[in-house]
Structure formats: C-alpha cells, structure tokens
C-alpha cells in the first residue's frame, strides 16, 4: 500500500463523513455563523465530532467539561450524547465568541444542557472544584496550557473519566524534538504528561480528515486520580 496523496485521504474522509456522519443543519449553521463572525475554521472535523459524541455515550457521561468552546460545534456533538439532565460546561475566553456559541447551542436545541462559562481556563477551572466531578473532559484551547488543563482534568474528574486532547499531531510537527513553535511544545509537554503521570492511561491516534494531518489523544483517569491533590 502506498502512502495516501492529499486527494486520496480527502476523498476517504468525505466518503466516511457521507457514509457515517451525514449532514446536520444545526451543526452546519453553527459552522456558518462562526465563519461569518470571522472566527477561524478550527472546529473539529465531522468524523471527530461524532467520535466525541460516541465517547460521551460509550462512557455514559452525564457531566462533560470542554475547555475551548469557539462556535460550539464540538459542544453540540457532546451535548447530544448526554442525557436530558446532563450538562456540558464549556469554557470560552472571549465574551463575543461565547455569545455566538450560545446562539448556536440554542438553535441546535441543546441550550438547556450547555453551560458556557466565559473567562480564561486558568481562572474558570478552579471555580469548578465545588461542583460534582466530570465524566468526560475535552481539551481544545491554547496548546501552550495543555499540561495545566490536563492537571485540572485529573483534579475535576474521577477514576474512569475520559480525557480527550485535540490537535496532537500538528501536521507531523509533534515528532520534531527541535521545534520552536510554542503550541507544538505545549502539545509535546501534554503528551509527555499523559505518558508519565500515573493519573492517566492514554493513547493517541493520528488523523487525516477535513482539518488536515493532526490527531487526538484519548486517556482514562486511573485510581491515582482519586488521591488528594497536594498543592
Ligand atoms: C488550531 C487550534 C485548534 O484547536 C485546532 O483544532 C486547529 C488549529 C490553531 O490554533 O491553529
Ligand atoms: Mg482543536
């Protein structure tokens, strides 16, 4: 088998998306609104949105934490995978973007299951310690902070919590030990933490989809995540 050309893997992604994901007016409207607001088209690919949705269902998640809302594309996918009395708490740093996300989740009919907290992750995350633990955590914000977000995921979850990190391939740059890009270094630090920190058991998959060559890390919190945190 030869390595795929861009035309070939784009055709495969389109085929898989048509065959298994299909079209959805509310998700497509969320992307369109995001685009007309001038936001970058960095939401997850449809096949990955469906993966997040399935992970929510497979894990029986009721409480989901998302770090990095953008136009709420992935938020909608995950909200559709939890029960009516479940919640996706999603953190968005920019108030203008949070307003777009709110309109998108409401249009999609999942507004009652989505709690958008506006503020930077490092400020919002400590406030969640008073709330029940999360069953699924999706990290998709500034990559420089991935280790901080992973630490919070371990603190705010429970043994068995599923943790997903977006953008772990970065067009192959993740395997470059000499990279100087701060977002790639942040991604590498996050992966190293997933490999070393006893609170996580993790793997990662490269992805080739409508967002190009990237990847996703998937972890579960171990019993070590139940131990008290020493500051
Ligand atoms: C970028 C961020 C993302 O979360 C993503 O999925 C793709 C790109 C970025 O900052 O470039
Ligand atoms: Mg991303």
Image (cartoon, helix red, strand yellow):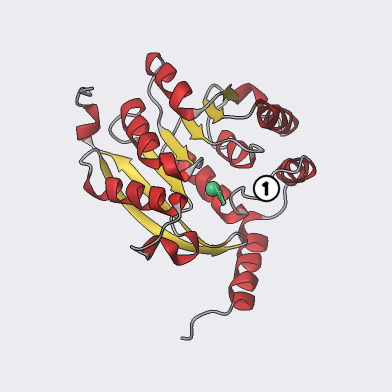
Residue 62 drawn at (x, y percent): 47, 28
53 in relation to 173, above or below: above
Question: How many C-alpha atoms fall within 10 Å of the one at disc 1: few (<14), some, or many (≥20)?
Answer: few
Residue labelled 1 has its Cβ within 8 Å of some atom of ligand 1: yes
Taking the view exactly as shown, the residue that stands out farthest to the top is 130
Relative to 78, is 33 on the left or the right? right
Q: Specify whether residue 62 is in view.
A: no
- The quarter holding residue 73 reads top right
Name the residue nearer the viewer: 102 or 190. Answer: 190
Give how far across and how far down residue 132 sits, in percent.
39, 18
Above-or-below relation of 171 to 3: above
* Residue 113 x, y percent position in the rendering: 59, 25
Residue appearing at x 31%, y 27% in the figure: 155
On the image, which quarter does residue 91 sit in?
A: top right
Q: Which residue is mark 1?
A: 40
Residue name at image x 33 percent, y 54 percent: 203
Residue closer to the observer: 45 or 231: 231
Where is residue 112, by image quadrant?
A: top right
SS assignment at label 1: loop
Quarter occupied by the C terminus: top left
Q: Is residue 219 visible?
A: yes
């Amino acid at each position: 088998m030869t390595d795929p050309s861009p035309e070939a893997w784009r055709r495969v992604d389109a085929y898989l998306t048509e065959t298994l994901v299909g079209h959805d007016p509310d998700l497509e409207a969320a992307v369109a609104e995001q685009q007309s607001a001038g936001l970058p088209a960095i939401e997850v690919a449809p096949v990955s949105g469906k993966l997040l949705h399935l992970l929510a269902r497979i894990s029986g998640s009721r409480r989901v934490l998302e770090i990095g809302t953008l136009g709420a594309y992935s938020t909608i996918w995950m909200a559709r995978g939890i029960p009516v009395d479940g919640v996706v708490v999603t953190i968005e740093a920019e108030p203008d973007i949070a307003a777009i996300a709110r309109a998108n989740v409401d249009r999609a009919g999942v507004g009652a299951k989505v709690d958008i907290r506006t503020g930077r992750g490092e400020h919002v995350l400590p406030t969640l310690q008073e709330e029940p633990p999360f069953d699924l955590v999706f990290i998709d914000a500034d990559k420089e902070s991935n280790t901080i977000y992973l630490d919070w995921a371990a603190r705010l979850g429970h043994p068995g919590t599923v943790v997903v990190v977006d953008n772990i391939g970065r067009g192959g740059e993740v395997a470059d030990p000499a990279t100087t890009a701060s977002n790639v270094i942040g991604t590498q630090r996050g992966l190293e933490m997933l490999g070393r920190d006893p609170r996580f058991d993790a793997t990662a998959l490269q992805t080739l989809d409508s967002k190009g060559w990237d990847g996703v890390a998937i972890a579960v919190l171990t019993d070590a995540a139940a131990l008290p945190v020493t500051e």
